[in-house]
Image (cartoon, rainbow, N blue to C red):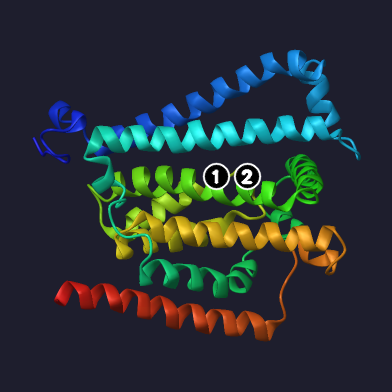
Amino acid sequence: MNSYYPENSFFGKAKFHPLFIIIFGLSLSITFITAIDIMVAKLSYPILGVSYEDYNHALTKENIPYQYLLFFIFRLSIIQILGFGLTGWLLALSANDWKKELFFDNNFFSKKVVWAGLIMIVSIPFYQVFMITPEQAAEFLSSEDLKLLKSIEEQSEKLLMQIMKTNLLFNILIFAVFPAICEEIFFRGFLFQNLNRFTNVFWSIFFSSLIFSLLHFQIYGFFVRLIMGAMLAFFFYFGKSIHTAIFAHFINNFFTTFVSWLALNGFISKEITHQNYQFHYLIVLSSFILTAIFTYLYYQSYQNEKLR
């Protein structure tokens, strides 16, 4: 029987197949998230003085009480830390020396980290082209499904916009730092690595990115997250460092958070915060060309290292 893991690791001793580990890991993450939701439901009355149903109803209102927003952020942060970060780390620990499994032992302050961040910055206008519009969604969804989807998307957008209008540093921590670290540990450090144990790099990138996008539960941004997930897996694998993926992920979320904060506080036009906002075609074209060039150079640096 093939041994996909080091013999001295827990998974290696048990002779587990990576596909089983992937299913187990995803189930473990969903279990953590479900348990967190149950815990939050129990805490809503002691902390807010309202039932969980009343709290959820309040989130649909125009002016959401600030303490309700903090409670929502608390839930979101715990899901990131436990549902993705801790779960991914525990699975990496069971599969191998966790630092080797996550490519964590490479230097954070390297050229590859800077390159990954630069590529992510220049690629943002290009990614936006792949946003699904409500009209496009209507082509493959029934009117009832679309109505429900639009309601969920609009509620989420309104909630996030109200949060992002507040303290900038706090929002960067919640929406940029936590997701960048925790999601990269889970989706690249755990999911991609285990896929890559029994399939090639292309399919490992594709399936890890597909699951990454699906688990965000947002159809309008599905293809954007699919492409972004592929780029992050590319940085992770060819950079042989989780720091490259974490930094690139952080840069993307930081840009979104900072621009939203500027727009919502009147420093720039609010149009840029709309989900279907499109950059000028010259900006998109420039973004595509620069992304292609820089990505090729990033890949070439990997090939040069292999030759050396």
Residue at the image point whose x is 23% and y is 47% from the top: 197
Within-10-Å neighbours for mark 1: few <14, some 14–19, many 20+: many
* Up-down relation of residue 271 to residue 166 (above or below): below
Contact between labelled residues 1 and 2, with CB atoms less than 8 Å apart: yes
User: Percent from the top left, x then y, of residue 208?
Assistant: 41, 50
Which quadrant: the N terminus?
top left
User: Percent from the top left, x then y, of residue 200?
Assistant: 26, 57
Label drawn at residue 174: 2
Q: Amino acid at mark 1?
A: Phe
- Tell me the distance, in whole angstroms, between the alpha carbons under discs 2 and 1: 6 Å
Dot 1 corresponds to which residue?
178
Residue closer to the observer: 129 or 84? 84
Q: Would residue 119 be found to the left or right of residue 263 on screen?
A: left
Q: Would residue 40 be found to the left or right of residue 151 on screen?
A: left
Q: Is residue 37 visible?
A: yes
Q: Is residue 275 visible?
A: no
